[in-house]
Image (cartoon, rainbow, N blue to C red):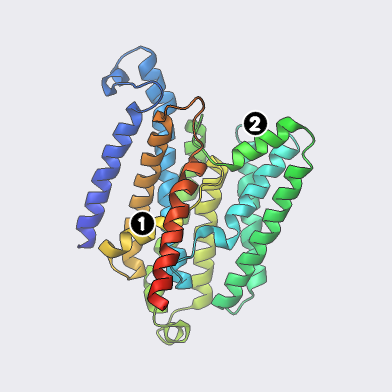
Amino acid sequence: MSGWRLNGLLAAALIVSMLASLTAGKIWVPPHSLWSDDLGALIILELRIPRTLLGALIGAALGMAGATMQGYLRNPLADPGIFGVSSSAALGAVCSLYFGFATSAWLLPAFALTGAGLGMGLLALLSGRSGSLILFTLAGVILSSITGSLTSLMISLAPTPFATAEIVTWLMGALTDRSWNDVWMAAPIVAVGMLFLAFTGRSLDALTLGEDAARSMGVNVRHLQWLVVLGVGLTVGASVAAAGIIGFVGLVVPHLMRPFAGHKPSALLIPSALAGALLLVAADSFVRILPSVSELRLGIAMSLLGAPFFMGLLFKMHRELA
């Protein structure tokens, strides 16, 4: 399927999904309520539209970050979380909750983005100046392990049960009660991050031939590494800051798109962004309409969807290697 046609179909499906998301929930609101003065218009304008836009932004960010990661590491099991940026952002947010600094709507995202920025800096420091993929992967694993351990430590040492519950609930990831402030905070950061990722396309195509071959074709591997670090750091950091940890989007979406977009990393970036937005908007609509007392956290729903997919992918790879 041609790239333009695939992107057009995904964009059309995303628009339909976003329109449907405005009506779905515990309270079903007909679209024409938007032009009325009743409670339905308030629900759509102040709750449903920012939540839907934020879901699309985060889904697009995680989808493109996952496609970039898999192309850069040449590993179909790569996920944005492997860099440790998401866990660094989560640690920053947990610090704000632990010390009681999250009283302002902007403080928790600010702490999360600071954590992501420090994680990116430490990642660049650990990986050195060579641009080696092996060093980069090991640095990401080390960073993820350190920040994950510190997050667990802060949960265990939380001063009150309320603080513990607040931290754990936030880490589950959700778009519940998100407002226009969250959209304005995340949108510019995600846009800049995705712009960095978009510039990696041609270099990622060359990298499929091997690191040495890419260098011989004029690819500056160190420059590419910085583009990937900055792009993934900004997109994932903003996503975690706005909604907590929502996993598996960056792993699942590129695999779903690869049979249609082809195996060139550059051809997979835009379809993965559109499909990631579509997946997260649809999943968020689904968790809202479930007949449960409290709303299922979106991060849990994505884990329930992504874990079986991941296991199936592992079995498929095992059969191919056997």
Residue, x 56% and y 62% (percent of image)?
82
* Mark 2 or 1, closer to the camera: 1
Residue assigned mark 1 = 272
Q: Element under label 2? A: loop
Give me the C-alpha separation between circle 2 and circle 1. Answer: 34 Å
Q: Quadrant of the C terminus?
A: bottom left
Report whether residue 202 is seen. yes
Report whether residue 270 is seen. no
What amino acid is found at the position of numbered circle 1 in the picture?
Answer: Ser
319 or 51, nearer to the observer: 319
> Seen in the image, is 204 located left or right of residue 92?
left
- In the rendered structure, find residue 217 and report the number of the disc placed on it: none
Which corner quadrant of the image does residue 233 belong to?
A: bottom right
- Badge 2 density bin: few <14, some 14–19, many ≥20, Cα 10 Å: few
Residue assigned mark 2 = 104
Q: Position of residue 161 (x, y in %)?
A: 74, 32
Q: Position of residue 2 (x, y in %)?
A: 20, 62
